[in-house]
Amino acid sequence: MENKTENIPLHVAVIMDGNGRWAKERGLPRVKGHEEGAESVRAVIRAARDVGVKYLTLFAFSSENWKRPQSEIDALMSLLVRFLKQNEHELHENKIRLRSIGRIADLPQNVRDELDRVIQNTASYTDYQLILALSYGGRAEIVDAVRKIAFKVKDREIMPEEIDEKLISSNLYLSDVPDPDLLIRTSGEMRVSNFLLWQISYAELYITPVMWPEFREEHFKQAIMEYGKRRRRFGNIE
Ligand code: FPP
């Protein structure tokens, strides 16, 4: 696909689903699905940069994922650390800034250390951002924002009448990141699963039956092409 600047979404968010089913279909352990899924993460980061998507947010671990067996949680955490170690150079080569959203304090110390290290090392890049949602829940993010606002009201920094949509947006985890224009979900499930609830109000949805471990560059570019054909009206008329 040629790199056209018009109709390229500024921000793409992805619910990476289907790792477990992909593995099961092949008689493999679930962790193999996650490992292959990490390859798709690499491919999609590259494809997003290639077409000019400035912000890419990936749902890597939800607040609900803590309910999975400890062995799977441990495997996902090790995979994340390995991914960060093995791919940091690619972030530098492509000048991609890494950021995270979620209740990061819930993550094991070694994951937090590695994450902090790469976040610090890439903090000066301004063109592209890769945002990993970790221990993330959309409702929890809204709860955290409401709490921050409540404290400001209590401290008389703001008046209750001043609470509006802009103020709520500015108290979410990353207030400087624009709302996603496109939300991609793999594996065919028709759900938003507590992902970026506030921010996806006007996002275009793209749901594909392709399982995440098989979702690669061409699939991502297909989604971008499909987005390019959509008419976004934001509640207005044409
Ligand atoms: C959903 O598949 C995926 C996850 C719970 C985690 C996503 C993690 C990765 C893609 C691997 C590594 C991530 C990074 C950032 C390196 P599922 O297990 O829910 O699949 P299922 O619905 O088929 O069981």
Image (cartoon, rainbow, N blue to C red):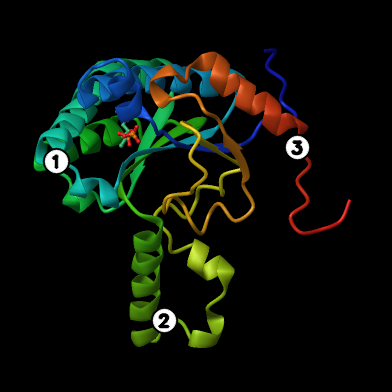
Circle 2: residue type: Glu
Residue picked out by circle 1? 69
Question: Which residue: 79% across, 41% down?
Answer: 231
* One can see residue 162 in this view: yes
Residue at position x 55%, y 32% in the image? 54
| Numbered disc in front, either 1 or 2 | 1
Q: Residue at x 81, y 58 (%)?
A: 236
SS at circle 1: loop
Residue 224: image quadrant is top right
User: Which numbered dot is residue 157?
Assistant: 2
Residues at discs 1 and 2 in contact (Cβ within 8 Å): no
Question: What is the x, y in percent for residue 202?
Answer: 64, 52
Label of residue 23 in the image:
none
Quarter of the image where the N terminus is located: top right
Kind of element beneath mark 3:
loop
- Residue 33: percent from left, percent from top: 29, 22
Label 2 environment density (alpha carbons within 10 Å; few <14, some 14–19, many ≥20): few
How far across and how far down the image is residue 233, in percent? Answer: 78, 51
